Image (cartoon, grey):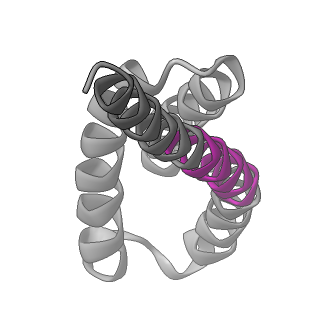
Amino acid sequence: MANAVSEVYNEMYQLNFNLLEMAQQGKWKEFIALAEIYVIKLHEVISTHDSSVQADEHSDFRIMFNNLIENETKIEQKIKNRLADLKTEMSTLNRSKKCNAVYSLGSINAFH
């Protein structure tokens, strides 16, 4: 692998791997902060890819992007699971709120 490709690959893969670890550990605040950096750097790599990469390096970049996509698929699944959990929690909170309102209404009526 060419030196430039290797450096870019290592940086992007490390960011990608850190995001995957954070998602697996449920460190969502840290995940969001790092995800912004990752997306910006990934955009930079993609936008400069054609102009700065030699023809023989294209296959190396293809391998790099395939690895990143594989990890991003795992990250996406973790995010979907987290969203499902949040949806369940919100639903539970809404039910509790309704129950409390009904209970309060019943308590107020009992005193009248």
User: What residue do we see at 41% from left, 37% from top?
Assistant: 97
Using the image as rendered, state which of residue 71 and residue 10 is in the foreground.
Answer: 71
At which x and y percent is residue 15?
A: 48, 32
45 to 27, vertically: above or below:
below
Q: Is residue 81 above or below residue 27?
A: below
Q: Quadrant of residue 38?
A: top left
Q: Residue 35: which quarter of the image?
A: top left
Q: Main secondary structure of the magenta part?
A: helix
- Magenta stretch encompasses residue 88: yes
Which span is picked out in magenta? 72-90
Q: Based on the picture, tell me whether residue 26 belongs to the magenta stretch.
A: no
Is 94 in front, or is 28? Answer: 94
Please state the horizontal and vertical placement of residue 91, each as a whole percent of the image: 56, 49
Q: In this orientation, which residue lies closer to the viewer: 48 or 89?
A: 89
- The residue depicted at 56 percent of the width and 51 percent of the height is 87
Q: Vertically, is 40 above or below 28?
A: below
Residue at image coords 34%, 82%: 50
- Return the x and y of residue 100 as percentages of the image width and height: 43, 30
Q: Residue furthest front?
A: 112
Relative to 78, does residue 103 appear above or below in the rendering? Answer: above
